[in-house]
Image: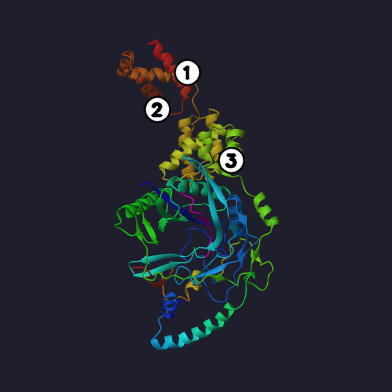
Amino acid sequence: MPNIEDYEAMTKISLSEDERAVVSDYMDMLLDSFNKLEDTDVSGVEPLISVLDVKGPMRDDLVIKTISREELLSNAPEQHDGYFQVPRTVD
Amino acid sequence: MKYETVMGLEVHVELATKSKLFCACSTEFGSDINENVCPVCAGMPGTSLMVNKKAVELAIAAGLLTNSEISPRITFDKKNYFYPDLPSGYQLTQLYSPICKNGWVEIETDAGKKKINLVQIHLEEDAGKLIHDDWTDTTLIDFNRAAVPLIEIVTRPDFRSAEEVVAFLEKLRSLLSFADVSDCKMQEGSMRCDLNLSVREKGTEKLGTRTEIKNMNSLKAIAAAIAYESQRHIDALETGDEVLIQETRRWDDSIGATFSMRDKEDATDYRVFPNPDIMPVFIDDEWIDAVGSNLPETAQDKFIRLTQGLGLPEYDSEIITRSKNLSNIFDETLKHFNNPKEVANWIIVELLSIAKGDNKGEDDVRIDCRKFAKLIELVDGRTINRNVGKKILSLILEEGIDPVEYAEKNKLGMINDTSLITSTIQEVLSENPKALEEYRGGSKKVHGFFVGQIMRKLGGKANPQIVNKLLVEALKEI
């Protein structure tokens, strides 16, 4: 079972000690709820992915341009020469 | 002590669809930065994803070509990871219901034929491209490639040598490119492969410590990486100087070595779960049969057609069926000039040597097949000679000229006029007394020199057979 620091690492969110205590409590509540499922016998039951077990619609392979690059980048906090720009991910 | 290398592959192949896996953005390679991105593949909240039918069909085709079982119902799963190459924070892939299972591909090496078993083939989306920019000291992201459809082909650890790995990848490339599933270009990244490798004592069952190698961009690099990594494992087992650990390593082609890729936070947990936003896709037998019956000719079928049907030598057929592009050029040219042997010759001898000079591979040669056919016909019908033909071929490739018009306009027609050729021969002989002296002295080499001089005077257009014949006669009389 991962501890709170593992979750911080996976989501790249740093918490203060106070926040950790609060989040930890919530996580315990969540996990307790889910753990109740462990008591249920699900042998032979297929996982349910969609309640609508009908044929999902598919697209034909057509190209449609919906937004311009300017629109796309307009939400980006940082951009550079048409690229999204983020803090360097490797040394 | 005798060692054995045990390997398995994960091959990623970009599918040849026009649009992305879940949205209508273009998949074109080499577009402007972030030009082919929409709210769906940019991971905006509230967007609706719809599966590209063609991508599913190409994955079914890949399954049929590799003798796989096709799953009747497929779903997509979220593989969660926090990295900026995918804007949604997860990759859509198929952990729980891969589209194809339990296939196999037969390969042939010097050691004979062998079956390579496949665990599965699954559909997934590609990631965007990251550029780590030294100038701004930031990471720059181009999402054009994000959500381009891929299949990942996972083999069992059935490989024992680099030859087998290379033979498998060549076979896969042939199968998939001939069926138009993918263009399988390793240099453009439309076919990429990761390798799992371990070494054990020959005759033992237990597998050794496994390393995964990434970043090999050519068959040559793969063979070199296998040689390097096997030796690294053997050295570690022999000397005990290094303890092997299960890890991912990156091949550096310029140095010729693998390097550990472990980062500080290796506790990756992808928390894969089914994506409830994408409805299951059902694949019935009718659909599978339709895909199967529309599959184009495989390289193997084509080889048989070329050798047995058209009577081409195995050598020629082998070269032409090695590349989907060459074999398309062959078929298309043959439609306009029905002489298989000549068309094959012109492709293998002339077209490929020009391509090689231009640093182009077999897959990158492009030619107007109608013009190519006309040119071959001009040479075959002795309207122009072969050397003139070669020059015209270069001009077709460079400038797109029409060979018939060009030959007429520049009066390149072959000179068959025996009296003109005879008088030119006499001219050349009288202008070169020294060479003639050498000929009399028994030097046969000067024959070629005379031919060259005569051809030069006639603008390279003389019929070489007639020149040869008349020159031999003229020299006899001297």
Q: Name the amino acid, label 2.
A: Arg
Q: Which residue is mark 3?
A: B302
Q: Measured along the vertical axis of the image, is residue B84 above or below residue B72?
A: below
Q: Nearer the viewer, residue A81 or B165?
A: B165
Label 2 residue SS: helix
Q: Amino acid at mark 3?
A: Lys
Q: Are marks 3 and 2 on the same chain?
A: yes
Q: Which quadrant is the C terminus of chain A positioned in?
A: bottom left
Q: Earlier in the sequence, mark 3 or mark 1?
A: 3
Q: CA distance from mark 3 to mark 2?
A: 43 Å
Q: How many residues crowd mark 3 within 10 Å: few (<14), some (14–19), many (20+)? A: some
In the rendered image, which residue does mark 2 sit on?
B456
Q: Chain of mark 1?
A: B
Please check the rendered image and state whether residue B153 is part of the magenta-colored stretch, yes or no. yes
Which numbered disc flags the more N-terminal residue, 2 or 1? 1
Determine the CA span between mark 2 and mark 1.
17 Å
> Magenta part of the protein: which range?
B147-159
User: Label 2: chain?
Assistant: B
Is residue A14 visible in this depiction of the protein?
yes
